[in-house]
Image (cartoon, rainbow, N blue to C red):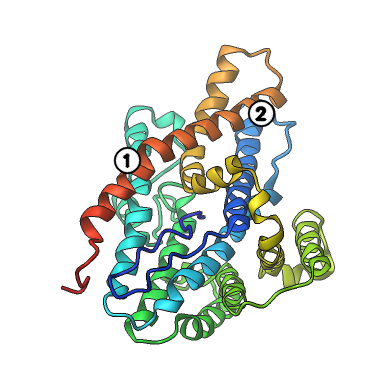
Amino acid sequence: MSATTDMADIPRPAAAAPAATRSVETVQFLRFVAAGMVLIAHVSFFVHHRVDTDVRILGEVAQGVALFFVISGFIMTVTASPHSGEPGFVRYFALSRLIRIVPLYWAVNAAKLLGFVLVPGMIAANPTVSNVVYSLLFLPAKNADGNIEAFYGVGWSLNFEMAFYALFALALLLGKRPTRFTIPILLAAGALSFLKTEAWPTAAYLLSPALFNFVWGILIGEWYLSGRKLPVPIAVALIAAGTAATFVPLAALQGLLVTKVHMGAIVLGFVALEDRIGQAIPKLLTFLGDASYSLYLTHPMVGVLSVVVLHKLAPWMPSSLIFVLTVLLCLVFSAASFIYFEKPITLWLRKRLLKRGKSVES
């Protein structure tokens, strides 16, 4: 997921209106929630396999990735759609996405590749050269076992993110309003995924129900841009219903929930409450929302290493304490990654590649 977008991610070309897009604090908070859900799911997996098999794997909270996709659709719509047709914005959009995603993703892939060479027993991967290369290019590829997997596990979600951004950029290039162009394609591709078989080519991996999540985000973004409001009770009910559907098995609704429409309900509910609770959200939580991409990408390495080291240093330590300490270590490391790597390198690349005052097509 990935948490690769925020309201300041899309710098404007010289021709754009001077007013900056106002940050939606509830969405920043949700970015942290989404990353935190994935973190908790993965740490429970690490503790189960490395320390105590009695620890339950919290697979249901891995749905945070779907929440990321909804958020991505929302933010792309709010930040980029209003600039459709502006000179130079296509290049701005494409470069800003690459600047935002590539450096940290390539860094964690390089770290995993180094670990694979030095301590292969610690690394859960069986890659081929093409698997690594395609993964770095955000393209689905098979590993040595014949499975379609990104070399860096959570990178699978970035394959979908980049495909969505490419579709959005194509709409901008063609002068189409991105929402009207992308929604039919995403719906068709999502529906086609239900017909997919193992005989289909590797590229068909990108045909998935996960694409519906972007549609919910786009629709919520359009609703937000329209200035419409929802009554508070309805917004709260949407959040409650979406949360319940996330954690309570509802067999009768599984056909509907495969589209993760309940994640769209959660995002819509929080966005509708922005004017009432947005400024009341603690700054620490919105900061962790900013750092959510670092948290999403670094926690698999930091998490498994923390679990192994803590268990080795203190074999008497309860698995519950190892779980809590690992979560805290992942949060601290991700904050440091954001402050000292992700943010500085992003700003440095923007200064050099996204210069203001010039036509970006020149």
Q: Position of residue 286 (x, y in %)?
A: 57, 47
Q: Position of residue 318 (x, y in %)?
A: 71, 20
- Would residue 233 be seen by someone viewing this image from the given angle? yes
The residue to which callout 2 is attached is: 324
- Quote the CA–CA distance across marks 1 and 2: 28 Å
Question: In percent of the image, x 53 and y 81: which residue is there?
Answer: 183
Left or right for 282, reference 341: right
Q: Is residue 37 above or below residue 161?
A: above
Task: Kindly indicate the quadrant of the structure image that contains residue 210.
Answer: bottom right
Question: In percent of the image, x 40 and y 87: which residue is there?
Answer: 176
- For mark 2, give the secondary structure: helix
Q: Is residue 284 above or below residue 118?
A: below
Q: Is residue 302 above or below residue 59?
A: above
Question: In percent of the image, x 60 and y 60: which residue is there?
Answer: 66
In front here: 200 or 344? 344
Left or right for 97, reference 361: right
Task: Kindly indicate the quadrant of the structure image that contains residue 213.
Answer: bottom right
- For mark 1, give the secondary structure: helix
Question: Disc 1 vs disc 2: which is toward the camera?
Answer: 2
The residue to which callout 1 is attached is: 110
